[in-house]
Amino acid sequence: MANVNRPFGLMPVETLSGREPSVHRYYIPSTDTDAYYIGSPVILAAVGDARGVPGVAIGAASGVFVGSVVAVEPANINGISQVGTTLDTTQVSIPATKTRAYYVYVADDPHQIFEIQCGATATNLVTTKLNNNFDLTIAAPSPAASPQSATIVDNATISTTNTRAMRMMGLAQRENNEVGAYQVVRCKINTHAYGNVIAGV
């Protein structure tokens, strides 16, 4: 049976130690011009809020990622209470054009294991390359109202090159997932902002 084309970005599933994914809060200023979705890969940004919450930005195809977005903080619409009817619990993504700052929760453990879908072309999607590295194709969902990122593996970049952004860790062991187009793989960030000797931002 052919794999289903249903991208979801980078989805945290566990860590190398077997622990549950851990998340931390990050800031996105109103001046940011990118859209964010659940599963969007992010990098550290040279910005922070007045209380010292560090900022993130959307990553490129390759680079030093810090993790993926797992939740958008509900907006405090009335500026009074963080409980009850003052919360906008329908906020599941962040628009490119912003009228306010946002906060997101990011799975940022350097040992975080993710699942991600590969692309449509079966290039490099063979069992002998399931331990290779790869870069990403960053994409917004269609329709844009969908809460999940459409970011996928860039199949053409799957190789042994040590500077690729992600490290593949085999096929996700689930029903209806086989080697070939749209396969879902397990992976971790190869060039992690907290896991390597990396310059600050």
Image (tube, helix red, strand yellow):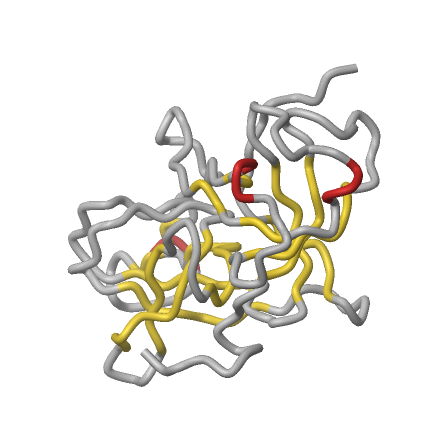
Task: Say above or below: 98 vs 81.
Answer: above
Q: Residue at x 64, y 59 (%)?
A: 188
- Measuring from the top left, give residue 70's x and y in whole percent: 52, 55
Q: How many marks?
A: 0
Hey, which residue is sitting farthest top in the picture? 1
User: Quick check: 107 left or right of 99?
Assistant: right
Q: Residue at x 59, y 23 (%)?
A: 5
Q: Residue at x 48, y 67 (%)?
A: 66
- Measuring from the top left, give residue 138's x and y in whole percent: 41, 43
> Which quarter of the picture shows residue 137?
top left
Camera-side residue of 51 and 55: 55
- Measuring from the top left, give residue 194's x and y in whole percent: 52, 78
The quarter in which the C terminus is drawn is bottom left
The quarter in which the N terminus is drawn is top right
> Which quarter of the picture shows residue 107?
bottom right
User: Quick check: 53 left or right of 160?
Assistant: left
- Measuring from the top left, give residue 35's x and y in whole percent: 30, 46
Task: Say above or below: 131 vs 120.
Answer: below
